[in-house]
């Protein structure tokens, strides 16, 4: 649950409030004494700088610097112990020809699509239903959100047990109705399906809460107007709710893209028993996501340069996908 | 559905709404069952023996072997030790994040100073970056200062919680009126007094949301502890749990008892505070309207 809830819609009413805001709020400046504060040097703001300094010191050391340092590492060969050797684009060239890297990209994308699409559709459907009911609202919200606060390790172990090939609950139930056991955790596609199911289970409630917040912010008068114009519930949903919710849907799509492409713990725990050998990610490496491959290269093989190259190449991929998603989600806006 | 239909045939306009509400409830209840089923089934597995789980078909009812399985867990891994590690790191991180983030968010929301836009923009930009981009250099940094394997290495990077600042910033902008700060200033309150005595008490709901958010994240974090806590006897609960799963696939009921013990405390605590938490999560969106 590393993603923020939605807050964007808060600003919309202000911006739409007309050419001149009702109450103009100048940004506050510290002591009230000086009538014209614009000539003051940066040093007179030391209190403000002091206040934000704890964050920015840690941020500089553990976020800002590392991001660029890993880009630097991607052009080196280094095992973390010996001397660093500049190799130019060699790591990326090797990456381009590395079938395992491309396999991991493919795995990651398949898992991402298989999990994001049902998650967001399910979340929107549940949010709409939840918005329409009056009773037990609080209970539903909590019960549906609980998967998101459950530890990913615990969930992965649970899914491993339930979908186990020989003794899992799923195969046992299938066996009772006469279907022979399905190799959930050894077939390449089923492995991805199980991981995607896990992620769907964990993230639907989270997205539902965000959608619900968006639905609650839509003023009732719009719906009343639509009703007077004779629009039915389905039509209202597609022609009023969806267009108004577009910014929020866009937000969830982006967050899901960033989160969904970062699947690591799920396959790592699910196929943890293979961690000792090179075959990370389960049989046929069908569950090897890109970040798992990164982990294997950087921390198990101590190939820091290659690990950094993987993670940066992957980051570029995320940016491309976010941009594509942005285009798709915002396309119909003018129509 | 039919029961409702026939029971209220004459209520005209309401008649059409009733069944729809019922359908919604049915779908929602099914969704709730799906979302809580893993907990129930984990309890079933944790209260039975491994033989019961391996049987075909498996036992579907609760058993009586829970204490025995828990005893096995306690004998196999240092459960309470790793739990203590987790609680310590999560608590320290949460408290510090609350302080650091609220102070910075207050400054950004209510004051102007040179570089404000640039600094805040950088923060927003990095909030969107995948964390894994930084994890390798973070590890190198930790090994340079000799913190690899130590709990403090766990807490430090997560203190730079950009989301917390962004979140509190939104909240403070709408939730703390300028007039109040002006009044305090006229009364002679300095910058830090305005923060501590005016802003902080007013943003308590947002703080409690952030506290739960930070604590849960820290408790469930897996990647960073896995990387940085290289010392086998000195790890967090999640890493210990994953190792329990790797090493003892033959004793499944014990592993499930471990899962239950590691996941349930947080879920229970969350359910107690959930009302405020979810209200806090949605508040930002509702604030402006």
Image (cartoon, coloured by chain):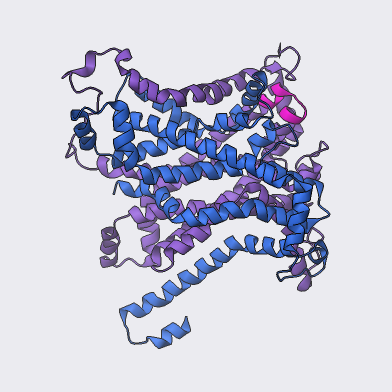
Chain colours: A purple, B blue
Q: Where does residue B50 sit, x and y in percent of width and height?
A: 81, 61
- Is residue A59 found left or right of B282 in the rendered image? right
Is B260 located above or below residue A296 in the figure? below
Residue A333 can be seen, yes or no: no
Between B262 and A170, the one lying in front of the other is B262
Residue at horizontal 69%, vertical 53%? B259
- Is residue A111 found left or right of B274 in the rendered image? right
Between A124 and A324, the one lying in front of the other is A124
Q: Indicate the quadrant where residue B10 lies.
A: bottom left
Is B249 located above or below residue A97 in the figure? below
Q: Where does residue B69 sit, x and y in percent of width and height?
A: 76, 58
Q: Indicate the quadrant where residue A26 lies.
A: top left
Q: Indicate the quadrant where residue B182 lies.
A: top left
- Is residue A162 found left or right of A121 in the rendered image? right
Residue at horizontal 39%, vertical 51%? A245
Residue A229 can be seen, yes or no: yes
Q: Where does residue B263 sit, x and y in percent of width and height?
A: 63, 52
Is A156 located above or below residue B87 in the figure? below
Main secondary structure along the magenta-highlighted residues: helix
Between A313 and B125, the one lying in front of the other is B125
Residue at horizontal 40%, vertical 49%? B280
Q: Where does residue A168 sit, x and y in percent of width and height?
A: 76, 61
Magenta stretch encompasses residue A42: no
Task: Give the number of callouts.
Answer: 0
Residue at horizontal 64%, vertical 29%? A311
Between A161 and A253, the one lying in front of the other is A161
Q: Which residues are magenta?
A: A298-308
């Amino acid at each position: 649950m590393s993603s923020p809830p939605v807050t964007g819609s808060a600003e919309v009413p202000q911006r739409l409030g007309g050419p001149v805001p009702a109450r103009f709020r100048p940004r506050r400046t510290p002591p009230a004494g000086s009538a014209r504060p614009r000539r003051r040097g940066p040093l007179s703001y030391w209190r403000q700088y002091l206040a934000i300094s704890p964050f920015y010191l840690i941020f500089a050391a553990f976020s800002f610097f590392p991001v660029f340092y890993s880009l630097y590492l991607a052009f080196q060969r280094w095992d973390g112990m010996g001397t660093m050797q500049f190799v130019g684009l060699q790591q990326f060239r090797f990456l381009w020809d590395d079938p395992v890297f491309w396999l991991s990209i493919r795995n990651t994308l398949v898992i991402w699509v298989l999990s994001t699409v049902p998650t967001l559709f399910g979340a929107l459907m549940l949010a709409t239903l939840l918005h329409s009911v009056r009773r037990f609202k609080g209970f539903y919200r909590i019960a549906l959100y609980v998967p998101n606060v459950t530890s990913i390790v615990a969930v992965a172990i649970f899914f491993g047990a339930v979908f186990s090939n020989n003794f899992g609950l799923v195969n046992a139930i299938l066996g009772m109705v006469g279907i022979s056991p399905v190799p959930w955790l050894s077939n390449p596609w089923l492995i991805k399906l199980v991981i995607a199911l896990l992620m769907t289970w964990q993230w639907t409630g989270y997205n539902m809460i965000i959608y619900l917040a968006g639905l609650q912010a839509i003023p009732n008068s719009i719906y009343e107007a639509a009703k007077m114009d004779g629009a039915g519930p389905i039509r209202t949903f597609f022609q009023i709710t969806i267009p108004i919710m577009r910014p929020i849907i866009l937000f969830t799509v982006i967050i899901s893209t960033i989160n969904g492409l970062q699947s690591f713990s799920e396959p790592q725990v699910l196929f943890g028993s293979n961690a000792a050998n090179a075959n990370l990610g389960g049989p046929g490496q069908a569950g090897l996501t890109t970040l798992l491959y990164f982990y294997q290269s950087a921390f198990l093989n101590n190939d820091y340069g290659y690990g950094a190259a993987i993670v940066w190449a992957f980051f570029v991929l995320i940016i491309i996908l976010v941009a594509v998603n942005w285009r798709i989600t915002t396309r119909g806006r003018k129509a | 559905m039919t029961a409702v239909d026939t029971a209220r045939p004459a209520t005209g306009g309401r008649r059409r709404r009733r069944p729809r509400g019922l359908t919604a409830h049915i779908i929602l209840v099914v969704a709730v069952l799906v979302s809580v089923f893993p907990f129930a089934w984990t309890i079933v597995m944790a209260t039975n023996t491994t033989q019961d789980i391996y049987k075909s078909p498996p036992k579907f009812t609760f058993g009586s072997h829970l204490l025995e399985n828990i005893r096995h867990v306690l004998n196999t891994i240092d459960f309470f030790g790793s739990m203590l590690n987790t609680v310590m790191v999560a608590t320290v991180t949460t408290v510090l994040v609350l302080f650091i983030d609220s102070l910075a968010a207050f400054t950004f929301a209510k004051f102007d100073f040179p570089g404000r836009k640039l600094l805040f923009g950088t923060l927003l930009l990095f909030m969107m970056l995948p964390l894994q981009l930084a994890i390798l250099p973070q590890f190198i940094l930790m090994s340079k200062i000799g913190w690899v394997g130590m709990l403090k290495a766990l807490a430090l990077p997560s203190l730079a919680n950009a989301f917390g600042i962004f979140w509190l910033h939104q909240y403070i902008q709408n939730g703390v009126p300028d007039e109040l700060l002006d009044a305090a200033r006229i009364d002679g309150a300095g910058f830090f007094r305005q923060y501590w005595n005016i802003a902080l008490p007013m943003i308590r709901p947002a703080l409690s949301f952030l506290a739960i958010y930070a604590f849960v994240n820290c408790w469930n974090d897996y990647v960073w502890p896995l990387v940085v806590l290289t010392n086998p006897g000195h790890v967090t609960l999640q890493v210990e749990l994953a190792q329990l799963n790797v090493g003892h696939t033959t004793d499944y009921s014990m592993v499930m008892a471990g899962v239950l013990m590691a996941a349930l405390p947080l879920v229970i605590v969350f359910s107690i505070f959930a009302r405020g938490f979810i209200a806090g999560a949605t508040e930002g969106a509702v604030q402006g309207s």
